[in-house]
Image (cartoon, rainbow, N blue to C red):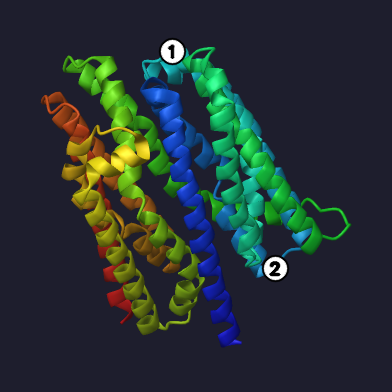
Amino acid sequence: MIKLKNNLLFKNIIILLITGGIAKVLGMLGKIIYTRVAGINIVSLYTLITPTFMLIITITQFSFPISISKLSAEEKYKNKDLLHNAYLTGFIIDVILILIIILSAKTIAILLHAQKLYKAIVCISFIIPFITISSIQRGFLHGKENMLPASITNITEEIIKILLIVIILPISMLKGDIFAIITIILFNIITEFFSIIIMNKVINKKYLTKEKGITSKKIVNSIIAISLPTTLVRLISSIGFFLEPIILTYVLLKTNYSSTYIMMEYGIISSYIIPLLSMPTFFSISIASALLPNITKAYASQKYKEFNKKLLKLMIISILIGIICLSFILCFPKKILEIIYNINLGINYIYIIGPFFLILYMQPTLSVAIQAMNLTNKLFKISIISLLIKYSILIILGLNNFGMNSLIFALIGGIIINTSLMFFTVLINVNKKT
């Protein structure tokens, strides 16, 4: 039995790495095509609302991939009942969220100092139901340890997105930058729709019976009990991402920087530099996600030596991959930026912030360890503390004429504080058990 489980674990890791790697390459290709087709103006404008977009997606998903996965794996409830109540919970959240977006869109656009983005923000609400459904289905399949269908959808989404960018985006650009941004947002409806079709076919064929699902308060409460605290942790990060351009714009405008300069430089950092330096995290996230059940089981069974051993291996693997990738980026930043994005801007930012991303690559492993120890509340506190320190640095340095470097130093401070707090949380709790 153990051998079988290990083989299944190895199979799932391979599936996640291969399909995730293909999706990552396609995503990178799509990013290259997108930045070249759209141009710097559209990219910069879209970057302004990206934090808002990510915040909305975080709330919409409501950590369904985690909660539904856990409940699906436990098999306490019938598959049909679980999905029925998950969709019901998602529907209620969607209705509330859509109303909030429509009512607050103008305010958000004003805060971003880009009122012309009002319609684009409203259009984000159209994709919410599709994200909810796909998140629930993805979590259900992961809980059944059927990684392949959900992994395939990651690839199909990227392929469809590339086709839409090549064929539809140039046409939409003829009607103006805002229309093009709205089109890019609505692309998500098409990609999520195809993902839903693929996963729904597998779910209906393998896991569902013809009987109707029963509405159950107990199941809804079980979903919320898992989803709510996990979502709060992610929400802190998304709120920070949402506030970042608002705080940065406010502070730099106070010190006489032009809105055009702020938009362009922030677009370079957020759309090119940070995504490039973040690429190695894909490997550590994939491996950590696949090994989470094993680490959780080891800790729950009080096999602390086994827990420590697996945790150490994950951290070593994450750091080694990070060193290799980061060294390559730091040695050839100009060439890489030209190949991927067709630009050579922001190289100075890479040299300043790049080395600190080696610390960031440890975070997925440390996060998994903290979740395995049932210390999700600690992650919430860590997120709040690091966020407050990060934006304190941004405000103080920004008001003291550090310009865009105030954001760079704030990012560095956030990485150091967040990773350090996570590391000491794991170390202290592990030492208590050994």
Rendered image: mark on residue 75: 2
| Residue drawn 43% across the image and 82% down it | 302
Give left or right: position of 93 versus 343.
Answer: right
| Residue drawn 46% across the image and 12% down it | 116
Residue 201 x/y as whole percent: 76, 53
Q: Quadrant of the N terminus?
A: bottom right
| Residue tagged 1 | 115
Q: Are marks 2 and 1 in contact (CB under 8 Å)?
A: no
**Residue 6 in sight here:** yes
Q: Secondary structure at mark 2?
A: loop
Give left or right: position of 340 versus 292.
Answer: left
| Amino acid type indicated by mark 1 | Gln
Say few, some or many: other residues with alpha carbon within 10 Å of mark 2 (under 14 / 14 to 19 / 20 or more). Answer: few
Query: Quick check: 141 above or below 90?
Result: below
Q: Secondary structure at mark 1?
A: helix
Query: Quick check: 187 above or below 328?
Result: above
Say few, some or many: other residues with alpha carbon within 10 Å of mark 1 (under 14 / 14 to 19 / 20 or more). Answer: some
Residue 230 x/y as whole percent: 48, 52
Residue 347 x/y as whole percent: 21, 38
Foreground: 204 or 166? Answer: 166
| Amino acid type indicated by mark 2 | Glu
